[in-house]
Amino acid sequence: MARQASPPATVLPGAALAVLSAVSFGIATPVVALAGRGVGPLSTAALLYLGACLSGFFQLALRACSQLALRAGSIHGFGLRRTHLARLALIAFFGAAVAPTLLAWGLQRAGATTGSLLLNLEAMFTVLLARAFYREPIGSRVIVALTLMLLAGAVLAMDSAGSRGLGWSVSGALAIAAATLAWAVDNTLTRPLSEQDPVSVVAVKATLGAGLTGALALLLRETAPRAHSALVLLACGATGYGLSLRLYLLAQRRIGAARTGSIFALAPFVGAAVAWALGARTAGALTAVSAALFGAGVYLHLTERHRHRHVHQLLEHEHAHQHDDGHHFHVHQPPVVGWHTHRHRHDRIEHDHEHAPDVHHDHDHDHGDGHDRDGGSASGPR
């Protein structure tokens, strides 16, 4: 058997990235609601993802001489292969066309605060889809954390519904709920790409999404936005969509789709707080209760520990990796430091350490015989 190791693979770094992604997206939502007034939903979506597109290509240009080498079969040297095109097209359709268009349409009818709160549904849909399609282990701690976050959103919604001046529309609410489902599908489809270069994924997804929604907006002759609104929406796209997606992909790489999606439920609370600061004073006394529930949910995620003895079988694959995680022992000449990608081989290894459902720990749990699929004794998140 190959060497043993106890890598420092905890949930905390990935959870922190998910929190930053949620904050970035949450801040953008009420700003989009304000800047998008009088702007067609397709035009709004196109400007948001054009901003994400420009941000992605700017980052790619800055690191043109980076260690990601151009190789045959890649898409413009992005490190993405032609085999990824179909998945990227679906991701762009659901996440960069359908979802933002529905969100923009719904925000104009349901308001910034209500719209922000309804985004809680994305976490629930993402967790369920990640469990259904990737068999990600969902222990009692994650279930309690997600329940607390959903309760927090419900409390905020009750608080807002009881306040004066809250715009409410059933059609707007349903549109935003449908947007969260589309983004949950996007999150689920994106998980296999989390090991690819995140900036490249953002750039390609945003380009396809902006092109599709922009073409439809022109075809349907939507009202063109004013220069100021367009600039604000572009900025929101660069940060709340481009940067947020990059952080989201990095989080998925470390802790999987379900946990990333659940922690991302912090975004609605951030959005509601920003909406309040911008003048949507619909929040009342129950906001403090909601904040406590959200805080408890995030704490449960940040302090989650999942550990059991498990076996990694002989494997050869390609993905972004570092050499300080206890799973990559191959040698480079000259030495390589930091994140890089190339095809490499893993010998069989058995060890016991904290881990999350990343690319190296995609094993089943609790089959009734005390062992997971790879041969290790199983215990759920604790």
Image: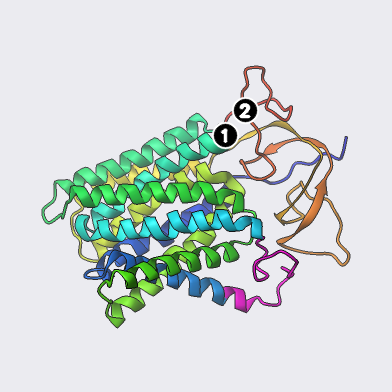
Q: Is residue 116 left or right of residue 214?
A: left
Q: Residue furthest top?
A: 369
Q: Disc number at residue 135?
A: 1
Badge 2 density bin: few <14, some 14–19, many ≥20, Cα 10 Å: many
Badge 1 density bin: few <14, some 14–19, many ≥20, Cα 10 Å: some
Q: Quadrant of residue 97?
A: bottom left
Which residue appears at 48% of the width and 29% of the height?
Answer: 140
Q: Is residue 247 left or right of residue 161?
A: right
Q: Is residue 115 above or below residue 76?
A: above
Q: Disc number at residue 365?
A: 2
Q: Nearer the viewer, mark 2 or mark 1?
A: 1
What's the magenta region? 59-81
Magenta includes 121? Answer: no
Q: Nearer the viewer, residue 323 or 321?
A: 321
Q: Nearer the viewer, residue 325 or 312?
A: 312
Q: Residue furthest front?
A: 219
Magenta includes 60? Answer: yes
Q: Quadrant of residue 65?
A: bottom right
Quadrant where the N terminus lies? top right
Considering the numbered disc 1 on the image, is that residue within a helix, a strand or a loop? loop
User: Residue 129: horizontal and vertical position, in percent?
Assistant: 48, 39
